């Protein structure tokens, strides 16, 4: 039997759920309280009550799932910290689940076959936003990574991308392209819906993530062995800066730091249909580029892979391999005409976010000593050299070139 305890404390609703699965029979029982404070004091008593009422012992738990955000800074740390404490005490793994993913699961259960666009109130007239495709069975695939936006920028952000988000609709399956589904209390903010097509389905503008859907998503992760050790669990933060320094305030910056304006680029999972453009870009920036077979094998192996697309087509891509403790960046490239515009940092941030969510300690990569631009870029992003692989790269005319091994280690959350 699988028994999962799920915690969600990223919003004013503190919820705890207990999922049990045996022989294909699934039961989820939830308890919750509402309030803007007190989550830290409420979680464990609620969990004990829930276990007692179901006649279960904490020692029967298979794992603990927790909502890792985005959401209230203190709230997501509460769920993460308590989950870590339980995990350490019982020697069981954890499963982090995005609040936006939990929102999408809520809608997908009722509205399969939709593009589901989720939004949560991030305060300061800003929203946390992500998009998912639900197949016929309600299973979800992430097509827009969680982002922080000004609420007034959300309509343009969505309308510029929603056709790209739907490019993975299974052949022959007529998903209603004219009617994406919007869910989440972030859509209630002023201007968040301004200009969006009237025929789009507005599902539930009061919806918040809860532990029921965290548990529901965690079961799939458990079955696929997608867990993290307690010491590697971390909250998902999208707001990189929460206050100005004293010097910045003295220079005239007041209030609180705001979300950066969104760039007109869509970050999407790499698919085989992208490979012709990926190969063309790769050949334009590498003296010894990867082959089509290299990329096909990497996708078949399930490596993490993304593309950046803009109005003029493919602007960049990244491919990385998940190892036990690190994510190994295999290739990262930006189109020559669009370099030095921050696109490399966007791709790198995606790898960093993925690594942190999967509990890795950092990133690893190799770079040629002769590639001064790449070395400068990675060093500026916090990578340091930890080794050298002799004669690693082909260099033409039968020669070989060393590879400098660089690593970026994450600071504890």
Image (tube, grey):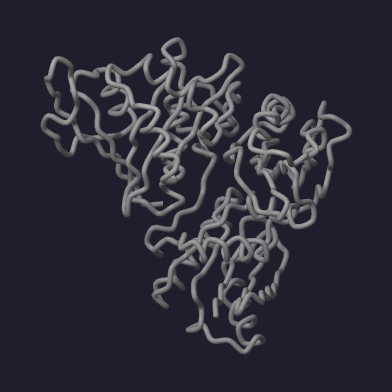
Image spot of residue 164 (x, y percent): 65, 29
| 139, 258: nearer the viewer | 139
Determine which quarter of the picture holds residue 382: top left
> In which quadrant will I find the N terminus?
bottom right
Task: Report the residue that reaches farthest toward the top.
Answer: 337
Task: Report the residue that reaches farthest toward the right.
Answer: 198
Q: Which residue does the image show at 66% across and 44% down from the upper left?
A: 132
| 183, 306: nearer the viewer | 306
Task: Report the residue that reaches farthest toward the bottom.
Answer: 55
| 299, 353: nearer the viewer | 299
Q: Which residue does the image show at 18% across and 39% down from the upper left?
A: 386
Determine which quarter of the picture holds residue 300: top left
Q: Which residue does the image show at 60% across and 24% down from the upper left?
A: 261
In-image side of 79 versus 293 (left or right):
right
| 71, 406: nearer the viewer | 406
In-image side of 206 versus 314 (left or right):
right
Vertical placement of 64 versus 282: above or below? Answer: below
Image spot of residue 139 (x, y percent): 66, 53
Image spot of residue 21 (x, y percent): 61, 76
In-image side of 266 versus 231 (left or right):
right
């Amino acid at each position: 039997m699988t028994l999962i305890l799920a915690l969600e404390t990223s919003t004013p609703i503190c919820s705890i759920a207990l999922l049990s699965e045996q022989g294909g029979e699934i039961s989820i029982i939830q308890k919750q309280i509402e309030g803007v404070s007190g989550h830290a004091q409420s979680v464990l008593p609620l969990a004990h009550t829930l276990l007692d009422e179901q006649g279960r012992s904490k020692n029967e738990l298979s794992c603990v799932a927790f909502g890792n955000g985005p959401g209230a800074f203190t709230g997501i740390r509460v769920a993460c910290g308590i989950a870590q404490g339980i995990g350490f005490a019982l020697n069981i793994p954890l499963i982090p689940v995005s609040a936006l993913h939990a929102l999408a699961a809520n809608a997908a259960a009722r509205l399969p076959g939709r593009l589901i666009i989720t939004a949560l109130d991030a305060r300061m007239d800003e929203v946390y936003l992500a998009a998912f495709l639900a197949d016929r069975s309600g299973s979800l695939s992430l097509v827009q990574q969680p982002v922080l936006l000004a609420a007034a920028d959300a309509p343009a952000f969505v309308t510029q991308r929603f056709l790209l988000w739907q490019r993975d609709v299974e052949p022959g399956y007529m998903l209603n392209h004219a009617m994406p589904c919007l869910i989440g209390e972030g859509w209630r903010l002023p201007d968040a819906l301004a200009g969006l097509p009237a025929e789009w389905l507005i599902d539930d503008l009061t919806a918040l993530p809860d532990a029921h859907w965290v548990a529901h998503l965690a079961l799939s992760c458990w079955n696929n062995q997608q867990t993290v050790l307690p010491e590697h669990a971390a909250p998902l933060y999208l707001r990189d800066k929460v206050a100005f320094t004293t010097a910045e305030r003295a220079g005239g910056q007041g209030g609180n730091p705001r979300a950066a304006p969104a760039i007109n680029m869509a970050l999407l999972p790499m698919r085989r249909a992208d490979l012709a453009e990926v190969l063309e870009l790769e050949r334009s920036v590498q003296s010894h580029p990867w082959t089509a077979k290299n990329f096909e094998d990497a996708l078949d192996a399930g490596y993490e892979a993304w593309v950046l697309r803009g109005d003029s087509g493919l602007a960049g891509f990244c491919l990385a391999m998940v190892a036990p403790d690190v994510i190994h960046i295999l290739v990262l490239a930006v189109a020559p005409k669009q370099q030095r515009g921050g696109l490399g940092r966007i791709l790198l941030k995606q790898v960093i976010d993925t690594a942190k969510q999967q509990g890795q300690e950092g990133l690893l990569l190799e770079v040629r000593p002769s590639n001064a631009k790449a070395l400068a870029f990675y060093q500026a992003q916090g990578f340091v050299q930890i080794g050298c692989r002799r004669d690693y790269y082909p260099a033409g005319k039968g020669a070989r070139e060393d590879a400098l091994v660089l690593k970026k280690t994450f600071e504890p959350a």
